Image: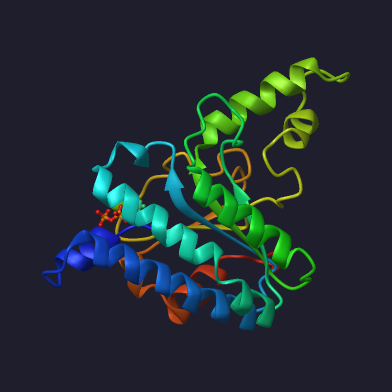
């Protein structure tokens, strides 16, 4: 969900306002994705690299994730199940503060019964860290390192392959997102910054998926 800072700068607003609007836009886009009958929507909320940003900005983004995971009533109304993907809270490098952990755990538990779309939020996520852990665990497994055993040891083994990977705000990089899962993904690049990413943009991305497998 890139381009929050630029969206704000274009309006002479502080970057934090761009993040706030970005979180609101995710709530809007989830509704649209549900209307489109998408089975899985995965968004990159915060990367393992994003901790290097200025403290006040990080604090603001953490608060927005607490808000996002607090949208349980809306998610239940939409029959959306929320999941999280990222460095396990008990791993040595994990940095997710306790209050965000609590919000994540509660949202997952309180929407677990929903059977519509699965919304997965990547927070403290990095694709390379995920792969290192998966390969280490695959190596210790009975079959050893195979594509299947690596898939089985990803953070969320049941997350289906990415059908279309969307990159907003003029960036044309993968940036460590779902590296293994995106092996066969179509790529949709747009100049639109995340807070302005709406139904038309989503439809353009979906048009890249041949037999709708999302
Ligand atoms: C994305 O917006 C939000 C996060 C990475 C948390 P940016 O903050 O990267 O926005 P730009 O790239 O500065 O416009
Ligand atoms: Mg950016």
Q: In which quarter of the image is the C terminus?
A: bottom right
83 up-or-down from 150: above or below: below
Q: Nearer the viewer, residue 41 or 92?
A: 92
Side of 199 where 39 appears, left or right: right
Report whether residue 213 is seen. Answer: no
**Residue 81, percent from left and from top:** 70, 66
Side of 43 where 144 appears, left or right: right
Residue ID at (55%, 80%): 32
Q: Point out the residue furthest to the left here.
A: 12
The answer to which image quadrant residue 35 occupies is bottom right
**Residue 133, percent from left and from top:** 64, 26
Q: Nearer the viewer, residue 178 or 209?
A: 178
Residue ID at (31%, 60%): 169
Q: Point out the residue furthest to the right here.
A: 142
Ligand 1 lies in which image quarter? bottom left
**Residue 153, percent from left and from top:** 74, 32
Residue ID at (52%, 44%): 98
**Residue 46, percent from left and from top:** 43, 48
Report whether residue 208 is seen. Answer: yes
Q: How is the image coloured?
A: rainbow
Residue ID at (65%, 58%): 106
Q: In which quarter of the image is the N terminus?
A: bottom left
Tell me how many marks there are: 0
14 up-or-down from 172: above or below: below
Q: Nearer the viewer, residue 209 or 70?
A: 70
51 up-or-down from 199: above or below: above
């Amino acid at each position: 969900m890139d381009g929050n800072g630029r969206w704000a700068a274009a309006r002479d607003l502080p970057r934090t306002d761009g993040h706030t609007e970005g979180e609101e836009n995710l709530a809007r886009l989830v509704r649209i994705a549900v209307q489109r009958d998408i089975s899985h929507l995965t968004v990159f909320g915060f990367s393992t690299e994003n901790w290097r940003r200025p403290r006040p900005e990080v604090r603001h983004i953490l608060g927005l994730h607490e808000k996002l995971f607090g949208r349980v009533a809306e998610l239940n109304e939409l029959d959306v199940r929320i999941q999280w993907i990222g460095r396990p809270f008990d791993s040595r490098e994990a940095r997710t503060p306790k209050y965000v952990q609590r919000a994540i755990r509660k949202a997952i538990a309180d929407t677990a019964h929903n059977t519509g779309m699965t919304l997965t939020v990547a927070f403290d996520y990095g694709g390379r860290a995920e792969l290192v852990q998966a390969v280490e665990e695959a190596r210790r497994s009975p079959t050893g390192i195979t594509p299947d055993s690596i898939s089985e040891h990803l953070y969320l083994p049941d997350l289906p392959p990415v059908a279309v990977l969307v990159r907003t705000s003029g960036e044309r990089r993968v940036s460590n997102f779902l590296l293994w899962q995106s092996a066969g993904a179509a790529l949709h690049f747009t100049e639109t910054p995340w807070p302005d990413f709406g139904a038309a943009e989503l439809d353009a991305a979906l048009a890249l998926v041949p037999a709708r497998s999302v």
